[in-house]
């Protein structure tokens, strides 16, 4: 009888053990032998580092003529030319030949002097008021020849009129502002320290 009870106890323990195993299996899951237990075995995608871009500096191409003319500054020249333009025009209209002499070439000085002398011989007078320069631009430049030359177009405004000996207006107007376009060529002798830019030619 005791042996029967012993078998019953073993059977009950076996049943309990089976139930426990089933519970553990349902909680932990079944191992298939293909599990990845090493974290380093996962195929993570390695982020790609940005490629360094090679910056190639671009140097502006400089022509031989630009290198040769590097000492010449257009803006500086135009400022000086504008001052010379106003000075020359004002002194020409006022008949001041002494003030014109250091600014003009011999040919232009001779031409301007002839006009001034003719006015004086006819007792003509000039009423003149320089308003200003509206625009100036270099239209030609040759720094290789000797003398060097630079041509500038001026657009200016002024009031000018000529009166005869009877004080009658024979040219221009006392009240009307005139817009004048002049094209002047300046020349300068190379390699001469005392040489200045002189007005060498004029045209409309």
Image (tube, rainbow, N blue to C red):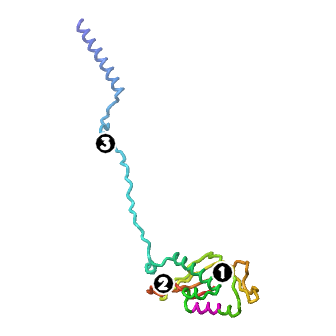
Calculate the distance from the C-alpha at mark 1 to the C-alpha at mark 2: 28 Å
Question: Could you say where residue 29 lies in the image, as x and y percent from the top left?
Answer: 35, 29
Residue found at the very far left of the displayed protein: 3
Left or right position of 165 against 85: right
Indicate whether 42 appears above or below 15. below
Question: Could you say where residue 175 lies in the image, as x and y percent from the top left?
Answer: 73, 78
The first of marks 2 and 3 along the sequence is: 3
Q: Quadrant of residue 186?
A: bottom right
Residue found at the very far top of the displayed protein: 1
Residue placed under numbered mark 3 in the picture: 41
Question: Could you say where residue 92 lies in the image, as x and y percent from the top left?
Answer: 63, 86
How packed is label 2: few (under 14 Cα within 10 Å), some, or many (20 or more)?
Answer: some
Q: Residue at x 38, y 58 (%)?
A: 52
Given residues 94 and 50, the one toward you in this image is 94
Q: Residue at x 35, y 23 (%)?
A: 23
Nearer the observer: mark 1 or 2; the answer is 1
Quarter the C terminus occupies: bottom right
* Magenta-span inclusion, residue 48: no
> In this picture, which residue range is highlighted in magenta?
107-116
Left or right position of 198 against 170: left
Calculate the distance from the C-alpha at mark 1 to the C-alpha at mark 3: 88 Å
Residue placed under numbered mark 2 in the picture: 143
Calculate the distance from the C-alpha at mark 2 to the C-alpha at mark 3: 77 Å
């Amino acid at each position: 009888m005791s042996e029967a009870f012993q078998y019953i106890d073993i059977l009950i323990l076996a049943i309990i053990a089976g139930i426990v195993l089933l519970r553990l299996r349902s909680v932990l899951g079944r191992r298939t032998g293909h599990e990845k237990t090493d974290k380093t075995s996962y195929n993570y995608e390695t982020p790609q580092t940005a490629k360094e871009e090679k910056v190639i500096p671009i140097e502006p191409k400089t022509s031989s003529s630009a290198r040769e003319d590097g000492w010449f500054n257009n803006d500086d020249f135009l400022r000086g030319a504008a001052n010379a333009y106003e000075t020359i025009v004002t002194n020409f209209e006022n008949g001041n030949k002494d003030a014109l002499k250091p600014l003009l070439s011999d040919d232009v000085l001779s031409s301007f002097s002839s006009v001034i002398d003719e006015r004086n011989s006819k007792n003509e007078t000039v009423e003149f008021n320089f308003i200003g320069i509206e625009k100036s631009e270099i239209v030609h430049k040759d720094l290789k020849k000797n003398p060097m030359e630079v041509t500038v177009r001026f657009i200016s405004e002024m009031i000018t009129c000529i009166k005869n000996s009877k004080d009658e207006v024979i040219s221009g107007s006392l009240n009307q502002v005139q817009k004048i376009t002049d094209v002047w060529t300046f020349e300068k002798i190379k390699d001469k320290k005392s040489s200045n830019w002189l007005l060498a030619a004029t045209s409309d």
